[in-house]
């Protein structure tokens, strides 16, 4: 579907977008010890558009959707994380049938803003996840211990975890300890102690953790991170620059740590060095452990 066709449909039959998403064939679940591979394309909704050294790479919506379509066409890709504007487009293309579909929720902490840690739920709400027929909701939990606004985000995420659990939906929580540098830019702490601390906070959100998964950075020393929780964890890709091989090596080691259940990768696979989306996806897939994968 071309951008012009999609725009016309939004004018003439807007309910078709939600209807197609709701009517998709459901995800059938995992086989045995199979690990997951999800593609993330929720960055633009909070104004984060840079990828692969290109400041406006993700601003071209048709290109972004084409890259996501190519990634989803590869064997062994289980699903996608996105906001409604992207998920509805992928559903119209018939690309979400049988996929695990996670709606991104708090996109109000706009990239580079002074209020970035006050990450309001401006995309999917827990009720919106259920109404759209999605499998779960993903939330970003950045905690700046020097910024009082952090408390609102922690509280909102705890409430979302609880509401999703009541509806039998997965809450995918992505926690980080962050701080502002001398220029005022928000920086993520990726030392083991900080990541462990973020994991322990995220694991305790809500009145049940039965439906909570974690989305965590892949560290060279992943064992103490996973020792801090009994929740399943998926590894995020992040911005890798030109070193895809280095990222693959780190992911491969981390995927062997007990409790790690797969990968959720966005820009690193959608905008890889050399723009070979299929090759990057296949390389990531080859790292996973389980039925039909390379161990």
Image (tube, grey):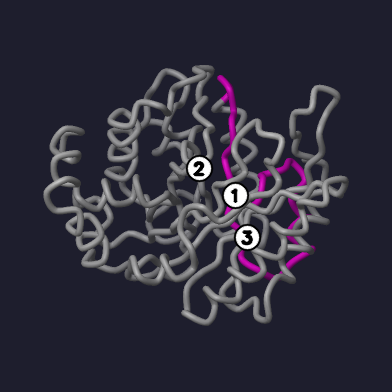
Distance, label 3 to label 1, CA atoms, is 8 Å
State the extent of the magenta-drawn residues as a range: 216-243
**In the image, residue 229 lies in the stretch drawn in magenta:** yes
The residue at 46%/45% (across/down) is 40
Residue beneath the point at 53% across and 39% down: 46
| Mark 2 or mark 3: whose residue is earlier in sequence | 3
Residue that sits furthest to the front in the current view = 11
Label annotation for residue 265: 2
Q: Position of residue 31 (x, y in %)?
A: 40, 69
Q: Quadrant of residue 247?
A: top right
Front-most of residues 93 and 158: 158
Any part of residue 224 in sight:
no
> Between marks 2 and 3, how big is the CA–CA gap?
14 Å
The quarter of the picture where residue 129 lies is: bottom left
In the rendered image, residue 222, in percent from the top left (x then y), is placed at 74, 50
Residue where numbered disc 1 is placed: 235
Question: Foreground: 143 or 268?
Answer: 143
Label 3: which residue? Answer: 214
- Indicate which disc, 2 or 1, sits on the residue closer to the N terminus: 1
**Nearer the camera: disc 3 or disc 1:** 3
- The image shows residue 95 at horizontal and vertical percentages of 24, 50
- Is residue 126 located in the magenta-colored stretch of the structure? no
Tag 1, which secondary structure? Answer: strand
Residue at 83% from the left image edge and 28% from the top image edge? 181
Q: Is residue 234 left or right of residue 276?
A: right
Looking at the rendered structure, the secondary structure element under dot 2 is: strand
Identify whether 35 is placed above or below 49.
below
Mark 1 surroundings within 10 Å by alpha-carbon count, few (fewer than 14), some (14 through 19), many (20 or more): many
Mark 3 or mark 1, earlier in chain: 3
């Amino acid at each position: 579907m071309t951008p012009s066709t999609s725009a016309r449909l939004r004018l003439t039959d807007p309910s078709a977008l939600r209807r197609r998403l709701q009517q998709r064939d459901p995800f059938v679940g995992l086989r045995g010890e199979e690990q997951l591979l999800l593609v993330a394309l929720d960055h633009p909704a909070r104004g984060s558009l840079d990828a692969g050294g290109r400041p406006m790479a993700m601003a071209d919506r048709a290109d972004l959707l084409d890259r996501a379509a190519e990634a989803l066409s590869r064997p062994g890709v289980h699903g996608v994380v996105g906001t409604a504007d992207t998920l509805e487009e992928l559903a119209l293309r018939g690309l979400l049938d049988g996929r695990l579909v996670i709606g991104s929720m708090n996109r109000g902490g706009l990239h580079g803003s002074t209020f970035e840690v006050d990450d309001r739920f401006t995309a999917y709400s827990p009720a919106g996840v259920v109404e759209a027929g999605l499998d779960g909701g993903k939330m970003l939990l950045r905690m700046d211990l020097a910024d009082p606004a952090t408390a609102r985000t922690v509280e909102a995420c705890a409430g979302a975890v609880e509401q999703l659990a009541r509806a039998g939906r997965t809450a995918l929580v992505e926690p980080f300890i962050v701080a502002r540098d001398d220029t005022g830019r928000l920086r993520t702490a990726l030392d083991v102690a900080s990541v462990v601390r973020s994991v322990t906070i995220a694991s305790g959100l809500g009145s049940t953790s039965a439906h909570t998964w974690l989305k965590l950075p892949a560290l060279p020393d992943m064992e103490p991170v996973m020792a801090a929780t009994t929740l399943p964890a998926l590894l995020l890709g992040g911005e890798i620059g030109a070193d895809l091989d280095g990222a693959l090596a780190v992911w491969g080691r981390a995927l062997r740590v007990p409790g790690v259940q797969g990968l959720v990768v966005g820009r690193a696979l959608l905008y890889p060095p050399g723009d070979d989306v299929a090759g990057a996806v296949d390389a990531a897939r080859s790292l996973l452990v389980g039925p039909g994968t390379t161990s």
